[in-house]
Image (spheres, grey):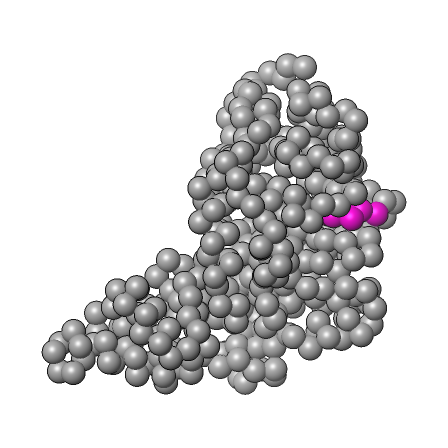
Amino acid sequence: MSIPDSVEINEGETSLIVPAVHSSGGPGKRIGKVFFNSQMAFNRDVSVMLLRARPVQSALDAMSGTGARAVRWGREIGGGMKVTANDRTPEAVEYISANIALNRLEESCQASHDDLRSLLARRAYDYIDIDPFGSPVPFIPAAMQAVKRHGVLGITATDTAPLAGAHPRKCLRRYDAMSVRSPFGHETGLRILIGHLIKEAAKEDRGARCLLSFYADHYFRTYLQMEEGGAAADAALGKLGYIEYDKTTGKTTVSMEPISHRSAGPLWLGPLHDSEILKDMNADETLAAAARCKKYLKLWREEVDIPFFYENDELSSLLHMSPPRMDRLLEQIGASGKVSRTHFSPTAFKTDLEFNDVLAIYRDIAGEVSGHH
C-alpha cells in the first residue's frame, strides 16, 4: 500500500512507512495530519524492553499516529500478544494499516479508528500506552477503568513546563498540584504526574506501583502496575507528600503536608523504579537506540531511588567554590553514605546523606583544592 508523500524507514527490527516530512527532535511541531517523531524511537525502545521483560496478552497503543509503536511490539516482542493500534484520524489509520501489512502482522495487530474514550469504555486491556501530544490528563480516568486487574499503564506527558514549575497555575488546574521552580524541577514534575495518576487510580479503589519512571528529551514517562483494592489505594496515597526548596540555603525538605505556599505537591515520594523489572530488561543491539538504552538502563539500575537530587554546580555556587569533579565527589560522598549519578542530569547526584553532611564534604574538597586542608 503506497501513501503519497511518505517514506519507508527502519526503526529497531521494524520497517515503517512514515510521512516524508516529520519531526526529529524537541516536543515536535505538528506537521501534516499524521504525527511521527523519530526522536521518540528511544521511548518506543523502552516500551519494547519493558514488554519483553513483562509479556502481556493484550496491549493498546491508544494514540498510535503511524502505528510505529504498536507495529514494533508486534514485530519485536511476539509471544502471542494481541495489539490494537488506535487513532481517531482517518489518515493515521491509513498509515497504521499500511505498516501492519508491510510487517505481515495481520494475525496479531489490529488497526482501530475510534475516539479513545469510547474505545476504553467498551474494551479492557492488560497494557494501555498513552503517548499524547501534550498532557495525558483527559484520558486518564477512562484508562484507569479499562486497564485489567494488575494491568500496566504506560503514560507520557510532554507538558513538562507546567509540571516542572514554569507555569504553576496551569499545573494546578491540570494536575491538582502546585509545581515550583527548583534545580530538580524535572524530578518534581515527574513525581507530580505520578501523584496525579495515583489519585485517579484511588478513585477506582486501585493502588499502583512504579515499574519504571523517567525524564528524557522533552517528556516525562511512567509505567505503573495496578494493585487492586481499597487497602492498596490507601497505601499508595500514603506515599504522596510535598517538597520545599529554599533558594537561599539550597536545603530541600520533604514532608507529608505542605510547609508553606512554596511547597510543591502533592507528589509521589515512593520509588520511581522496580529493581526486579530493571534486572529483566535487556538493551540488545536490535533496538533503534541501543547505545542510549544501555546507558539509561545502567543509570536506572544504579540510581539511589529516593526523592530528589543535588546539582553539583548549584551547591558549588552556594558555597562560592568551583564545582568539584563528579568522580571525586561521588567517591567522597560514597565513603559516608549511599550515592549515585542520576538520569535526570549528568551534573547531578542522589544521596541518602543529610544536607549538612553533603555541604561538609564540599567544603573538605574545596579545602584540599586550595591547599588549606
Which one is nearer the viewer's eye here, 51 or 247? 51
- The quadrant of the image that shows the C terminus is bottom left
Figure disc tally: 0
- Image: magenta residue range: 124-128
Q: Position of residue 72 (x, y in %)?
A: 63, 33
| Secondary structure predominantly adopted by residues drawn in magenta | strand
In reply to whether residue 83 is colored magenta, the answer given is no
Which one is nearer the viewer's eye here, 204 or 310? 310
Q: Residue at the spot x=57%, y=77% of the render?
A: 242
Q: Position of residue 18 (x, y in %)?
A: 58, 25
Q: Residue at the spot x=53%, y=80% of the render?
A: 254
Which one is nearer the viewer's eye here, 79 or 29? 79
Q: Residue furthest left?
A: 371
Q: Residue at the spot x=57%, y=29% of the render?
A: 13
Judged left or right of residue 340, residue 177 is: right
Q: Residue at the spot x=61%, y=77% of the render?
A: 241
Q: Residue furthest right?
A: 122
Would you identify the image quadrant in which residue 111 lies?
top right
Q: Position of residue 76 (x, y in %)?
A: 64, 34
Judged left or right of residue 186, residue 274 is: right
Would you identify the image quadrant in which residue 325 lies?
bottom left
Q: Is residue 334 visible?
A: yes
Location of residue 215 with respect to 132 vertically, above or below: below
- The quadrant of the image that shows the N terminus is top right
Q: Position of residue 281 (x, y in %)?
A: 59, 49
Which one is nearer the viewer's eye here, 242 or 159? 242
Q: Is residue 88 visible?
A: no
In reply to whether residue 127 is colored magenta, the answer given is yes
